Amino acid sequence: MFSVRFHGRGGQGAKTASRILGTAAFLSGYLAQDSPIYGAERRGAPVAAFTRFGREPIRERGAIAHPDVVVVADASLLSDPTAHVSEGVAAQTPVFVNSSLTAEQLRAQASLSGRIMTLDVTEIALQQLGQREAISALLGAVAARLSGLEREPVRFAIERELNDLGLARPVIERNQAVALHCYDTVRVMTIDAGLGRARAVTSLHTPRYEAPTRGTARISAAGNSVLRETGGWRTFRPVLRADKCNGCWLCFAYCPEGVITMNRDDKPVVDYAHCKGCQICVHECPTQALTAEREEKGGVAWTAR
Ligand code: SF4
Ligand code: SF4
C-alpha cells in the first residue's frame, strides 16, 4: 500500500488534490481510498487529507500516521504546531512544499524532517491560471508524480474531479495543462513504500470512557479568542491603497473575523495578528482600494506588521 498525506489551509484544495490522486490511482488499476479531515474550522485553518492506494484491499482507515509522501500546500504550515506536518515523517520521506524558497532556505527557517523539495505552485497558478487559490489540480499532479503514477490517469482524474465541482470545460483544460506542467517539473525520488509503517510500533489502545463533562471540548475562560493568532493562516494579506479608499466601511461590515477597525479618516486598519487572509474584504471593496499581496514570498514566517 502507498500512502500520501496532504497538508493545506481551508480553501486551498488539499481535499480535491487528494481526490485527484485517489482517482488517478484508481484509473491506473489500483484500489484507492481518500478522505479529508478539517473539523469545524474556517477558511485558512490547517486541514489535512489522506490518500491510500494499493493492489490489495485497504483495511486501514483514518489519518495516515506514517506517510510515504507528504505534500504541503502552504509553507506557513511548517511552523504551525497545530498542523503536525512532520509527524511520522522519516528522514527519507519525500516532503513536497509549495514555496518559492529552496529546501535549504526552508530548513533554515523551521526544523523539518524528510527529503524536502519545493516548487512555487501558487506563483504558477497565478501566472498560468490567474487565480491564487486554484492549486488543487497542480498539487494532485505533483503527488501523483511522486507516487509513481503515469501522466494520462492524472489528466483524466483532474477532468473527472473538477467536472464534479462544476467547473467549465475551458477552466478544466487549463488546469490539466498547468497541472501536467507541474507533473513534468517535479523531481522523481525513489521511495521505500511502507518503510515508516513497518518501523512503527503498533499496539491496541482501548480508550477510557470519560463523562461528557470531561470529554467534551469546553471554553472555560471568557474573551480568549484574541489569544488565538489566526494571522499565521494567511497566504495573502489585504493591503490598503488609501488614495483609492472612499471610506464606505464595507470592508469593516463584511470582515467575518471583526479584525478591521476604521480610523478617524474612515480608512480601514487591519489587525494582521488575527486577519486570516480570507480576502472577503478585497472582493467586497467597491474601489479596489484593498489588494491581496502574497505573504512573505513562500517563506514559513509571518509577522503581525
Ligand atoms: S481583514 Fe479581510 S482578509 Fe482579513 S479576515 Fe477580515 S475580511 Fe478576511
Ligand atoms: S471597502 Fe474599500 S473603499 Fe470601502 S472603506 Fe473599505 S477599503 Fe475603503
Image (cartoon, helix red, strand yellow):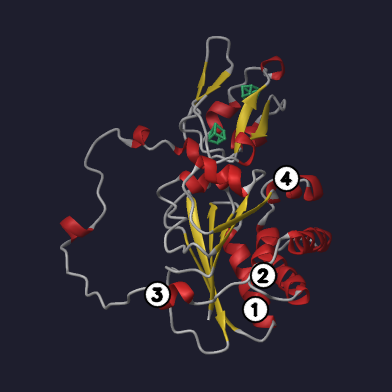
Question: Residues at badges 1 and 2 in contact (C-beta under 8 Å)?
Answer: yes
Local packing at callout 4 (Cα closer than 10 Å; few below 14, some 14-19, many 20+) is: many
- Ligand 2 picture quarter: top right
N-terminal-most mark, 1 or 2: 1
User: Is residue 251 among what the camera can see?
Assistant: yes
Instruction: Locate residue 180 relative to residue 104 in the image: left or right.
Output: right
Residue at which label 4 appears: 123
Please tell me which residue is depicted at 53% across the width and 90% down the height of the picture. Answer: 56
Q: Is mark 1 within 8 Å of ligand 1?
A: no
Horizontal and vertical percent position of residue 270: 53, 25
Residue type indicated by callout 2? Ala
* Alpha carbon separation for disc pair 4 and 3: 37 Å
Residue indicated by mark 1:
25
Considering only order in the chain, which callout, 2 or 4, is on the residue closer to the N terminus?
4
Q: Check disc 3: other Cα within 10 Å, few if <14, some if 14-19, many if 20+.
A: few
N-term mark: 3 or 1: 1
For label 2, being within 8 Å of ligand 1 is answered: no
Residue 33 is at least partly visible in this image: no
Please tell me whether mark 4 sits on a helix, a strand or a loop.
helix
- Farthest top residue? 264
From the image, tell me which residue sits under label 3: 199
Q: Secondary structure at mark 3?
A: helix
Residues at marks 3 and 1 touching, judged by CB atoms closer than 8 Å: no
